[in-house]
Image: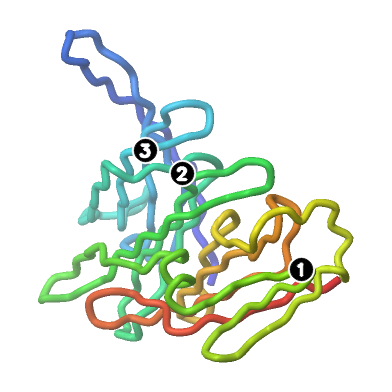
Amino acid sequence: MKMKMFNIGLFIFFFVWPNGNPYAAQRVVTSHIISDLWYENIFLIADKIDGVATKNFTIQIGGGVDSVGGELFYNFPNWYNAKFAPKLFHEDINGDGLKDVIVSLITGSGSGLSTKEIHVLNQFKDPNKRYQEVPVESINDAVKRLVNIGGEGNEVMVEINNMKYFVDLMQFDYQFLNESPAVGSLEDYKVENGVLFGYTTVFVAIPEASIGELKIKYIWEGKTYKAESVEFIEKVT
């Protein structure tokens, strides 16, 4: 499908502190998806608060230079993105035939590490089109519930559904292995063939000593997206 391209402007709003002094907040489009259909254009807009961080997000659904109106706006004042551009998806991930809006924000990053926060706006028609944010089980909570990770000596064990994977650390050229196996310091979310997945790296020392990653599959349970299964993908030397 050919995508329409147009320039996205930046907007300046002025607010007033309680002492009466105004300050400027720059509203910027941090991510966007442009469709051939104006009402499927998605814009993720936020306040730029320093060189890289943004907060106070708004999702605009619909609109563009050739639109005829009828845009939808959803405001999330507590959302915060620490660095780089957020990820934005517009796909049906619960199988009801309606496209949902998925936003992956960066909550922390540095030295090759990045923690993420996922937000899903499910689309409903009752009878009018609307979107509503719904809960998503976090990567850390899913790993605590479904995965057991342990280590002894030069061997790490990853257990999922009574299946045990053993990783010999001697196959890696790591210099410092003084930490217990852990996850959560490097995360990602992706939508693949209409399914939401979360990814997290398994470390034996931060930040460089990785032994593989966990791929978490989410399903819609009617009120929340919950991790259904986890796959361990061992790092190839």
Q: Which mark is residue 153?
A: 1
* Labels 2, 1: front one: 1
Residue at image x 19%, y 69%?
A: 129
Displayed quadrant of residue 103: bottom left
Please indicate, yes or no, whether residue 174 appears anywhere in the rendered image: yes
Question: Of circles 2 and 3, which is in front?
Answer: 3
| N-term mark: 1 or 3 | 3
**Closer to the observer: label 1 or label 3?**
1
- Which residue appears farthest toward the front when viewing the image? 153
Residue highlighted by disc 3? 55
Q: Which residue lies furthest to the left in this view?
A: 127
| Quarter assignment of residue 38 | bottom left
Left or right, residue 48 beside residue 149: left
Q: Quadrant of the C terminus?
A: bottom right
Nearest the viewer among 66 and 221 is: 221
Q: Is mark 3 on a helix, strand or loop?
A: strand
Which amino acid lies under the numbered mark 2 shown in the image of this protein? Thr
Seen in the picture, residue 103 relative to 234 is either above or below; the reply is above
Disc 1 to disc 3, C-alpha distance: 44 Å
x 68%, y 47%: residue: 112
| Residue 169 position by quadrant | bottom right
Towards the viewer: 171 or 70 = 171
Q: Can residue 36 be seen in this view?
A: no
Secondary element under disc 1, as helix, strand or loop, is loop
